[in-house]
Image (spheres, rainbow, N blue to C red):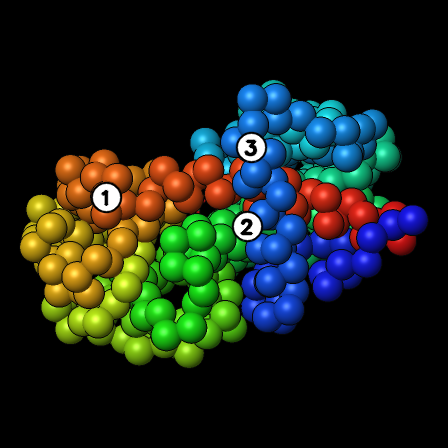
Amino acid sequence: MKKIFDYNKKHLIECKNLTKKEIQCFLKESEKYIKINKKKIKKTNLLNGRTVFNLFFEDSTRTRTSFEVAAKRLGADLINVSVKDSSINKGETLLDTMTTINSMSPDVLIVRHPEEGISLKISKIVSACVINAGDGSHEHPTQALLDALTIKKRFGNFKKLKIAICGDILHSRVARSNIEILTKLGCKINVVGPKSLIPKDIEKVKVYSSMKEGLKNCDIVMMLRIQKERIISKYVPNEKIYFEKYGLDYNKLDYANKNAFVMHPGPMNRDVEIDSKLADDVTRSLIQEQVTMGVAIRMACLEILINNKDI
Ligand code: ASP
């Protein structure tokens, strides 16, 4: 008998339409994987014989490898498609590539691509489950879920928490997904950054252009990478000046609550958006913890989606 989860869809594309109950379902299911991941032998056979494809059309270290670790720990076979050696380079369209792979009967396609909305399009033409692992500046659901799990493990719950999300909000799919998830869980969100890096249509948050004001009373300061691959230099003319105004160091962290924690999705531009020493200070920084939680949440996502595919 298949399990009935509070998340009953077979794709995970965006946080915008997730309910609080659905978010909690992923967080709850991750708990058992947090425990398994602490054991000496981390392998389970839950997804034995299932096939998962990693299709990354943009660079990635954490997301790609943690999906690989997650799939393998669940016993699934994981295929990493190297885009640079694929027929995309011979002119095949992305959707043709996806249809081709779908004909090999995969269970899950994990897709990262610079085009916003591409995972949704793919989910409409394949029979496999689709996980959006980042589509341009749009969304990155598993990052926001792992961030929520990290916060839950540290604070116990989300009520009354105030979180500052700082830096390049405009180009950040991490910010967009986190705002959706964390507000649904009951957190208050401040976004902080230069006006040029804040989207005009931003909702559900308070907007600040001063770190001093934006970090006041915050329990968590989530820093974002300046998206150099998406940014034109007019947004950040000088990294040194940017660091002085918006880079998080111990002094600026003092604007937040006394024991506030620092988060960053990685990869970091050290000493541009975050002081190198602070990033490595495990008494204040949850950055490594975020990576650890990433494996657990991705194991839960694979389990839940594949279960839903079978119903
Ligand atoms: N790794 C995250 C992402 O893929 C954050 C970043 O790249 O800045 O969106």
Crowd around label 1: few <14 · some 14–19 · many ≥20 (10 Å): few
Q: Measuring from the top left, give residue 38's x and y in whole percent.
A: 52, 31
Q: CA distance from mark 3 to mark 2?
A: 18 Å
Compared with 171, 77 (above or below) is: above
Q: Is residue 288 visible?
A: yes
Q: Position of residue 243 (x, y in %)?
A: 12, 50
Left or right: where 189 falls relative to 259:
right
Residue bearing the label numbered 2: 142
> Within 10 angstroms of label 2, few (less than 14), some, or many (20 or more) residues?
many
The answer to whether residue 177 is left or right of residue 28 is left
- Residue occupying image coordinates x 17% and y 61%: 258
Please say if 186 is above or below 244: below
Determine whether 51 is above or below 231 in the image: above
Amino acid residing under circle 3: Asn
List the residue tagged with mark 3. 37
Which quarter of the picture shows residue 302? Answer: top right
What's the residue at 67%, 25% (across, down)? 43
